[in-house]
Amino acid sequence: MATSGSTPPRLEIPAAPPRPQVPPGHGRRDAGRLADEVFHDIASRIVHGDYPPGSRINDRALAIELGVSRTPVREAMLRLERIGLVAVHPSRFTMVTEITEEMARSTWEFSGLYAGNIVRLAFPHLSQEARAHALTLIEAAATTVDSPTEWLSAHIALFSFLAERSGNELYRTLLGDSWYLVLRNLIHVGIPDGATASFRALARAIIAEDREAAERAARRVFGVD
């Protein structure tokens, strides 16, 4: 874990597209792009803990800070509510959702099954060079489990690399906006004990070219048998 008083590195979130520069007064389409930009901005803040679980977000103050009207902020909040990151109380306030024990369990379970499927799909498409790079990424993930931001970045790097080689476009785009919810939950609740051992097992399975063992190990990283 980061030492007391230190600032952990910011997580690089690949799901968020480059922020568009939207000049004012460019009609309905640009208004939609602006709302999209505001959505990604707020979602990133929630993931990074700038707005921790249980905190309230003042729509008016945020609109002033971002230099936009309240309309794109409200649209972004409704989108965040649909994926479960905030609860909107009309005419009162918006609150970042708490991470319940059930939500943590569901996140681990989903992440384990998702990771296992990605490994299974990618396995036949891995060249020797790709396998070697995957082993490097696995080692990085196995050695960063004590730093919440670093281990999550390492997980993203590993499973994004494998997803690119899965041969399944749907798996690469499946989560959409919900990617932020998964990231937020994981960075706050961490991963189950035994993740390092599971990563070592994943590395051994890749070296042995054992697809079934690799899938099981990827699931166990998140506590899924």
Image (cartoon, rainbow, N blue to C red):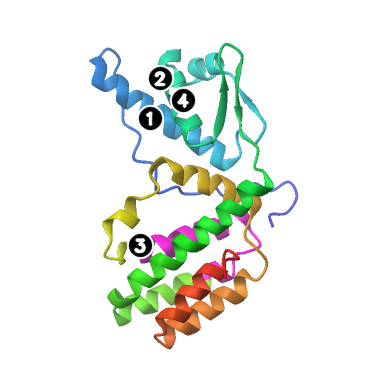
The mark found on residue 145 in the picture is none
- Sequence-first tag of 1 and 2: 1
Q: Which amino acid is tagged 1? A: Glu
User: Marks 1/2: CA distance?
Assistant: 9 Å
- Give the label, 4 or 3, closer to the camera: 4
Q: Residue furthest bottom?
A: 208
Comparing marks 1 and 2, which lies closer to the viewer?
2
| Secondary structure type for disc 1 | helix
Q: Is residue 70 above or below residue 96?
A: above
Asked if marks 1 and 2 touch (Cβ < 8 Å), the reply is yes
| Residue 163 image label | 3
Q: Quadrant location of the N terminus?
A: bottom right
Residue at which label 2 appears: 72
Mark 1 touches mark 3? (CB < 8 Å): no
Q: Is residue 170 above or below residue 197?
A: above
Query: Is 150 colored magenta in this rendering?
Result: yes
The magenta-colored residue range is 140-162
Q: Disc 3 and disc 2: Cα gap in Å?
A: 32 Å
Question: To which residue does mark 4 refer?
Answer: 78
Mark 1 Cα-neighbour bin, 10 Å: few <14, some 14–19, many ≥20: many
The residue carrying mark 1 is: 37
What residue sits 64% from the left and 42% below the top? 99
Q: Amino acid at mark 2?
A: Pro
What amino acid type should be assigned to the residue bearing mark 4? Leu
